[in-house]
Amino acid sequence: MTYYAEILIRRKGEVLHREGRTFQRRALAKAWSAKRELELQQKEVFSAPEKLIISELINEYIENFHFWTNKAV
């Protein structure tokens, strides 16, 4: 028998992070999920996403894309 541990983090209905692993023992699955959730909290996966400004995205696109060759820099 195997055990599947899944971590699913949602905010306001939007999935921010999802991952899972299979283990031979239930205790290992529980331990992994608890440890991984702490790691994700430290990496601030739970924090608010960075706000993007359209003008910055457009400028970055223009700087990194050569229209005449259709290739990224």
Image (tube, rainbow, N blue to C red):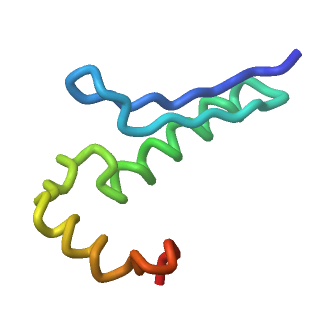
Residue 31 position within the rendered picture, expressed as x and y whole percent measured from the top left: 60, 37
As drawn, 1 above or below 48: above
Looking at the picture, tell me which residue is in the foreground, 35 or 64: 64
Q: Is residue 44 left or right of residue 66?
A: left
Residue at (60% x, 30% y) in the render: 30
Residue at 33%, 49% in the rendered image: 45
Q: Is residue 33 above or below residue 54?
A: above
Residue drawn at point x = 15 percent, y = 69 percent: 56
Question: In the figure, residue 12 lies in which quadrant?
Answer: top left
Residue at 84 percent of width and 29 percent of height: 24
Q: Residue furthest front?
A: 68
> x, y (%) of residue 58?
21, 66
Where is residue 63 shown, x and y percent of the image? 29, 82
Give the residue at the far top of this rendering: 1
**Picture mark count:** 0
Instruction: Give the quarter of the figure containing the N terminus.
Output: top right
- Judging depth in this view, the residue of 67 and 58 nearest the camera is 67
| 43 displayed left or right of 30 | left
Judge left or right: residue 22 versus residue 67.
right
Residue found at the very far right of the displayed protein? 1
Check the image and report above or below for 4 versus 40: above
Left or right: 61 with respect to 59? right
